[in-house]
Amino acid sequence: MSDRLHPAQLLRAVLPHVMAIVVLMVIAGTFYKKSFDGYRLRMPDIEHHIATTKEVNDHRDRTGEQALWTDSQFGGMPTFQLGMRTSDVNAGSWLGRILRMGFPRPADHLLVALLCAYLLAAVLGCGPWISALVAIGFGLSTINILYLGAGHAAKVMSIATLPGILAGVLVAYRRNLWLGAGLAAAFTAVNLSANHLQMTYYLAFLVGGIGIAETVRLVMSGAARRALVTGGVLLAAAGIALIPNGALIKPTLDYTPHTTRGEVLLTPAAGVEVADTGLDKDYILQYSMGRGEWWSIMVPDIKGGNNPLYWGEQLFSGGAFYFGAILMALFMASLVLRRDVLRWPMLVVALLAIVLSWRDTSGLTDFFLEHVPGFAKFRDTKMMLMLIQCMLPIGVGLLLKDVTAGKVEWNRKLFVAAGIPVALLLMFGAMPTVFFDFESHVRPDRAVEQLGAARALEQRLEVFSADVWRSFGLVLVAMAGLLAAVRLRASGARPMVINGLIGFMALVTMMEMHSVARRYQPADRGWVRTVEYKYPYTAAAADNAILADRVRRNPAVQQAIEAEVERVRAAYPGRIGKREQRVLDAAKFSGLQTVDHFRVLNLRGAFSDASVSYLHRSVGGYHGAKLRRYQDLIERVLQPEQQQFAALANSAGMDAALAAMPVHAMLNAQYIIYDPAQQPIPNGEALGNAWFANGWSMADGADAEMAAMESLTDSRRAVVPEVHSDALAGVLPGAANGGRAELVSFTPDAQEYRVSTPAKGLLVFSEVHYPEGWQLTIDGVPADLLRVNYALRGVVVPAGEHSVEMAFVLPSVQSARTMASLGSGLLLLFVFGSLAMAFLGRGTVEEIN
C-alpha cells in the first residue's frame, strides 16, 4: 500500500502552511510598507558603500569590465570587499533571489528571516501556529531591525539564513539524510553569498555542538554508522556550498593577511598590548556589552536601549538586542522540561554566547582570542548573542510541539520551569540596584554630568522599571498560557482549543515584538525616495569649487563631463526632472574622474566618513578591512599631520600648515576640505601623480621605515626598505631632479605614464602599494615594482624617455570565477539530486541504519 497522500489529503496538509507563509509575507510587507511605495530606507552604511564603490560601478557601466582595484578611498585598495560582483557565477546568489520573492529592500531581508525560521520549526514537526509564532519572534528580533536600519544588510541576510542551515542539519540527523543535506547545502550557499563570514563562523559553534550531541545520541543507540555517514555527507554538503562562493572567498582569503586582520608589522609602544595577528583586543571588544546588558534579549531597556540615558558599556548603542520576553521565557522553560539531547548544546552555546558578548574580558574571552582559530578576526563579540536568537525556533518550537502532543506532564517540574523566568523578572523589578549597575564606566556619562548622579539614577530607574514590569507581564502571559495548554491537553481538550491558545500567544508575540521593533524603526521615519537612495549625496560648495577649478585648468575635463552626462541621461530609466538633478550632478564628477586624477582630504571625519569617495578620490574613507600598511600610516603619520595642519593654520599661516603635510603631498592630496559649505584649500605642495625622488634613506624593517616617515620633512625624499638596496645600485641621489612623469591614461586598475629623465632615477608614484597583482613595464619590458615610503609604489627608471605602465592583474581571481561557475552547477545538481533522492524514499533513518 502506498504511503503517499491523496491529493485532497495533501492539500489539507499543505494549505495551513501556505496560509501561514502568506501571513509572514504580509508581516514583512506591512512592517516596511513604504518600500512598496517608491521609497527606500535610508541606511548609512549602504550610503557609504555606494560612495566607495561608485568609481568601480561607473567603470563597469561604461566599459562592462570589472575593476579589481579602486582609488576611491585610502589611496587605493582591492575591490574584493568593495564592489566586486560575483553574483553572476554564484548559485547561492541565485537561490537567495528566489527566497526574497521579489520583495524590495529591506522587506526582502525580513521576509527571508521569517521564512527560514518557519522552515526550521516546520521540519522539526511543529504545526503552522507554532512555526509562525517562532518565525515572528526570530524575524522581528531587533537585531534584524537595528542592523537593517544601519545598512548592515549583508549581516542581516546572513543571520536570516542561519535557521535554514540548522533545518538541514537537524533533518539530516533525525529524518532524512538527503533532504537534510540538500537543505543544508542550499542555505549554506545562500548564507555565504551574503558575504558576512562572521555570522557563518559563529554558527559553526552551534552546528558543531549539535553535531556532537547527535553523534553521541546515535552512537549510544547503536547507530554509529548512521552518525558517521550523516556527519560525512553534511561536511560534503558544506564543501559543495563553499565552491560557488569561491570567486569572493578566495580573493578575500588572499587579501586578509595584508589587512588590519593580518600580521602586525610595527612594534607597539611600551605598555600597549597588540595581537600578533588579527585585530587588537580593545578594537574587537569596543562594541561588546557589559555583563548585565545581555539581559536586553528579554528586557529591551535593561541598560537604556537607544535612550539618551543609556548606561551600558558599549561605545555606542543604537538599541537593544531584544528576542522577546515571551519567547525567552518559553526557551528557558524548554531547557528545563525537555529531555531531548539538543538542550545540552543549546545550553552550552547560550552560556558561551553570553560570556563572550561581554566587553570586560574574562579568562574565557582571552582564551578564545588567543587560541581559537579565526575568533580574533572579527570585532563586536556581542553578535554571538544571535546564536540564542537562532536557537529559539528549536527550543520553543519543540516545547510547544511536546505540549500539543501531551508529552509535558502536569507536575512540580512544570511549575519550576514556569517559575524561573517569572521569579527572575520579579527580583529585577523589586531590587534593581542589587542586580544591576546604573552608571556607564567606559564612555563619558553625559547623563550624570548634566543631571547629577542622583537625578540620573532616578530617571534611569524609571526607564529600567517600566520595561522590566512590561516584560514581567508578558512572561506571566506566556507561562500562564503554557500551564493552561498543558492542563487542557491533560484533560483531553480538543486540538483546536490548544492551537487556538498557541495562536493567541503568537498574536501577543507579534504585538510585543512589533512594538519594540518600532522603537528603532518607526513606520514613517528614515525613508527616502528611490532616487535619493541610489544617489545619496549631493555636491556641496567645496565640491563644485573643485570641479570648476579642474574645468578651468583642463578643457578636456568639460568634454568628459558632457560625454558622461549624456551617457547617464540616455541610460536613466525615466525622465530626469528637478528631483533627479542629483543623478546628473554625480555624472559630472564621474566624468571628471575619467580624465583627471587627484585626491581630496576632508578634515571632518577623514578616516570614518566615505562620502568624499562619492565625488572624489579620497585620502581617507570608511572600511572594516583596510590595508595594514595604510592603517599604520594613518595612525602614525597622516593623523598627526592633520593635527599639525590645524595648529599651524591658526598660528603660522596656511603655507606653513601645508608644508607640514609631506605625506599628504605624496598622496597627491590637491584639495583640503575643512567645511563642505566653504571653498576648499588648494594644496600647492601636492607632488602630483608621480615624481623623481631627490634622495632617499634606507631602512631595515617596518619600525625603521615608519620612524623615517615620521621624521620626514622633505616630501621628495624617499624611504626605501633595505631589501631594495640592489635595485638602487647605480642610482645617484638628485641626478634625476630634472625628470618628469605625466599620467597620460588610467582606469581604476591600470595607469600609463610618459616619463622623461636626464639620468637613472627612482620614480615614486602617489599610489598605494599592494604586494600581489600589480605588474609594471617600462617600454613594454617587465620591471621590478618597489615598495617605498612604507606604503607607496616606486620603480627605477633608466635615463631617457619612456612609457611606464602598471596594471593590476590577478589570474587567481579569474580562476576562482571559473571554479565558482563549475561549483554552481555542482551545487544545483547536488541540491536537486538530494531532493529527488528524498522524494524517492532514499536516505531515511531505516535505510541508513
Image: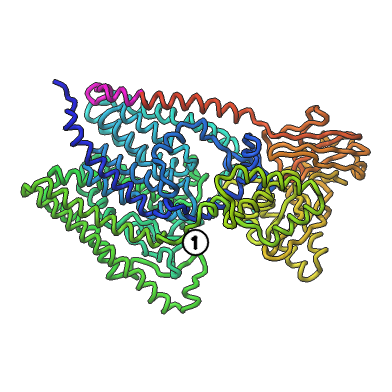
Q: Position of residue 762 (x, y in %)?
A: 84, 40
- Give the camera-side residue of 164 and 270: 164
Residue sitting at 23 percent across and 52 percent down? Answer: 333
Label 1 crowd bin: few (<14), some (14–19), many (20+), radius 10 Å = few
Residue positioned 59% across, 54% down in the render: 577
Q: Position of residue 451 (x, y in %)?
A: 46, 78
- For this rendering, which residue is in front, 145 or 270? 145
Q: Quadrant of the N terminus?
A: top left
Location of residue 759 in the rendering, given as x and y in whole percent from the top left corner: 92, 37
The magenta stretch is 833-849
Foreground of the two, 474 or 504: 504
Residue 17 in view of the camera? yes
Amino acid carrying label 1: it is: Phe
- On the picture, is 80 further left or further right than 802? left
Task: In the rendered view, tell whether residue 254 sits above or below residue 27.
Answer: above
Residue at 89% from the left image edge and 35% from the top image edge: 801
The reply to whether residue 347 is in sight is: no
Q: Which SS class for mark 1?
A: loop
- What is the quadrant of the C terminus in the image? top left
Query: Was residue 770 drawn as part of the magenta stretch in this picture?
Result: no
Task: Specify the quadrant of the image occupied by residue 277.
Answer: top right
Which residue is under mark 1? Answer: 316
Q: Main secondary structure of the magenta part?
A: helix
Q: Position of residue 736 (x, y in %)?
A: 91, 42
Horizontal side of residue 340 vs 751, given as left or right:
left
Foreground pick, 319 / 65: 65
Q: Answer left or right for 133 relative to 61.
A: left
State the scheme by which the image is colored. rainbow
In the figure, is residue 141 to the left or right of 452? left
